[in-house]
Image (cartoon, rainbow, N blue to C red):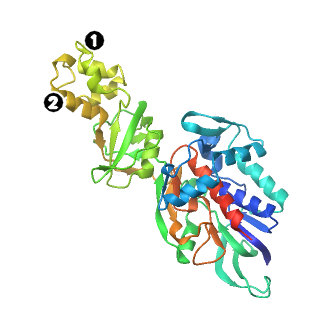
Amino acid sequence: MHRYDVAVIGAGPAGLLCARNAARRGLSVLLADSHKRPGAKLAAAGGGRGNFTNRTLTERHYVTGDPAFVRAVLRAFPCEKVLELLRELRLPFEERDFGQIFGLRPASFLADRLAVQCGDAGVDLLFGGTATSFTRPRTSPAFGHGTKNAFTFAVGKERIEARSLVIASGSPACPALGADDGLARLAASWGHELVPFRPVLVPLVMPSDWPLSGLEGISLNVRITVLRNGRPLPPDPEGIRSLLFTHRGISGPAVLTASCFRMPGDDLLIDFLPELPVMELLDEKEHGRLIVRNLLSRFMPARLADALCPDDLARRKCAELGKKDRLRLAENVHAFRCRPSGTEGMKRAEAAAGGVALSGLSRHLESLSTPRLHFCGEVLDVAGLLGGYNIHWALASGALVARSLD
């Protein structure tokens, strides 16, 4: 039996930073992961470069059951904390649109270098085996004459006992990389509320007969609003992002972000010219002689212009349109309403919403029902929008848990 102060399950950014920081505080730490190398999902983040954080960090950039708690964590661990970590690890980075901070080296370097620092701090690394056979805390003579609780589990033939257990195992998004919800379900079996996981940051599938089918390959900047029972949800904080038509529906940053809010049965309202009001374009004298379809095709791809123009208006001159026709055209362009039939699922999702509910945890992410059981990272009911928010949350929550361990 191997005994530790802390056992961390999951060697993504949350688990790695938690294990390193806990060991630097003098605790004996085990970090276990079923993969042979740390950061399996991290290696695919941000196109392989890693979008690690964002200059703009607010609770509005997260889907969660407890925005106030997320706000407190972000205030304690702002963007600069991640930049300090990148500098410490000697990982160069650059800032891109929307305040996104990308690495200039493969994202896997973050995991590899944190793993090296874990080893230097004395963390025992146990990779390539699945942790199983967990038991709830029990009295252990090895810790303080039988007065303290311990967790036990197995990794292969190794038996592990630890005073504190940290679950940093992620979510079921990207199952091809070995992701699953096994430890989230374990938490549920121990009495924690588990908000059902759903794919987010994922392309949306449209019905085969939707009016804009056949436009795959077209990309443009749009604003998307999610409608629930006809009412708009709070908008994407960044507003305008790119949309890409696919052979099955729509994708691109605007859609991936909308997928975080959208639930089955919700509608989307798409503004295809968010910075150019159609009514103003129609009022300009030099556009009066243009036919409607040609006017729109000056500001968007021609195939999309054809699809958005009502058949009875497409070949008419702009100057000939009455008020009702103008309003009808503007609604098609600025408030195109559609209902996705689904998503591309967990296999295409970059993250998952849902997870262990924050309501069952302390402000230090410790279980209220099982002392010394902690959670961090994507296993929690906190999902970030597109832009580096999920990796930032992983690091912020991992650092928070490490500070509370003893």
- Above/below status of 31 relative to 296: below
Q: Front-most of 244 and 15? A: 15
Q: Residue at x 26, y 34 (%)?
A: 332
Under mark 1, the amino acid is Glu
Can residue 26 be seen here? The reply is yes
Locate residue 139 relative to residue 27 in the image: left or right: left
- Above/below status of 139 relative to 386: below
- Above/below status of 321 relative to 101: above
The disc at residue 286 is 1
As helix, strand or loop, the secondary structure at mark 2 comes to helix
Q: Position of residue 143 (x, y in %)?
A: 78, 82
Q: Residues within 10 Å of mark 2 (few under 14, many from 20)?
A: few
Q: Front-most of 99 and 149? A: 99
Under mark 2, the amino acid is Lys
The disc at residue 324 is 2
Locate residue 311 relative to residue 386 in the image: left or right: left
Q: Residue at x 29, y 21 (%)?
A: 281
- Above/below status of 327 relative to 285: below
Can residue 129 be seen here? The reply is no
Q: Say whether disc 1 or disc 2 marks the residue closer to the N-terminus.
A: 1
Locate residue 75 relative to residue 346 in the image: left or right: right
Whether the residues at callouts 1 and 2 have beta carbons within 8 Å, the answer is no
Quadrant that contains the N terminus: bottom right
Q: Position of residue 90 (x, y in %)?
A: 78, 42
Q: Residue at x 28, y 54 (%)?
A: 229
As helix, strand or loop, the secondary structure at mark 1 comes to helix
